[in-house]
Amino acid sequence: MEKNEKNTSMKLRFLGTAAATSMPLVFCNCEICKQARINKGKDFRKRTSAIINNEMLIDLSPDLCSMANLYDIDLGKIKCLLQTHSHSDHFDGGHFITRWSEYATKNLTHLDIFCSNGTANDINHRVKEEEPTFDLFDKGWQKDMNFQLHILKHNDSIKYNNYEIRAINSLHDDRIEALVYIVSSNNKKILYGTDLLEISSESWDILRKYKLDLVILDQTYGEGFNNGGHLDAGKVVSIINKMKKENIINENTLVYATHISHEGNNTHEKMEKEAIQNGYHIAYDGLEIQL
Ligand SMILES: [Zn+2]
Ligand SMILES: [Zn+2]
Ligand SMILES: [Zn+2]
């Protein structure tokens, strides 16, 4: 951590908060996308990603470079990549391959990568599209690109420097064993819950062991617009209510929705008004939260 961050136990910045390709959607002219083009600001959303304490990146988004430039983040200092899953809005093989010595990247910081086995296999295919001889599991490539791979499965908990990372099955895509994570450090606990289909009863048993300070949930869809694979506004509210009832969160816990699409959602301002009435907030690109 940087010296000036000593008084902060944990800091999370939303780098991107959009579902699928971005907000507005490339070719879309629905009312919400039209409004986004007029309003700009909080209604422009890049693909979902976040960073903790400027050193732990959650998802290697295709928009990573523009995010880093906008928010003045030195990606050369990233020590850890927590990858939820390998869908193309969360992982960019083209960015990753630039760690290879062929690209003449200098002074690479060692990178610890955490993901499921299914996601690692899929990432491997995606990076192979950039360089066919690449192999994520090969020690030679790991040495050249200065990274180490740590495979996690549902309910695994590992210590990493000052952090504890707990993996939870997101049920978002079984083929690639998609995960969400609870990250704890200095007595502060964050649930990074996107992309998320639902919290299974087994996962609720895990969550009951935590008192969360920050909860981030998938709100891809507005209520009644669920096309599958994700939570919607209605499901977000019922999860929040259940978390309160089960004492997983309290009145001091911050709750934010992210991974916002144009399907049944609205402008940031209108969504935020509605969310506040239900005890949470809508994230936007660049928003920084200090715990
Ligand atoms: Zn996604
Ligand atoms: Zn649209
Ligand atoms: Zn996904």
Image (spheres, rainbow, N blue to C red):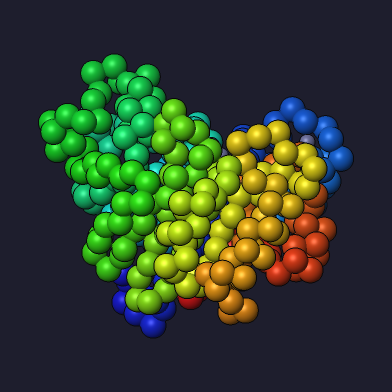
Q: Quadrant of residue 225?
A: top right
Left/right of residue 14 with respect to residue 107 in the rendered view? right
Q: How many marks?
A: 0
Residue 138 vertical position relative to residue 209 in the rendered view, above or below: above
Considering depth in this image, is 279 or 291 the residue closer to the camera? 279
Indicate left or right for 80 with 228 as reference. Answer: left
Where's residue 117, x and y in %?
31, 35
* Quarter placement of the N terminus: bottom left
Residue at far right of view: 31
Q: Is residue 184 above or below residue 58?
A: below
Residue depicted at x 79% and y 52%: 267
Instruction: Name which quarter of the figure residue 21 lies in.
Output: top right
Asked whether residue 18 is in view, the answer is no
In this picture, is 104 found above or below 113?
A: above
Q: Which residue reaches farthest bottom?
A: 7
Residue drawn at point x = 54 percent, y = 44 percent: 195
Instruction: Report whether residue 154 is seen.
Output: yes
Q: Indicate left or right for 223 with 129 as reference.
A: right
- The residue depicted at 61 percent of the width and 49 percent of the height is 218
The image quadrant that residue 278 belongs to is bottom right
Q: Is residue 273 left or right of residue 213?
A: right
Give the x, y percent position of residue 269.
Answer: 79, 60
Where is residue 50 shown, x and y percent of the image?
49, 54
Residue 252: percent from left, percent from top: 58, 79
The residue drawn where x is 41% and y is 36% is 177
**Residue 153 against residue 251 in the figure, above or below:** above
- Farthest residue, direction top: 132
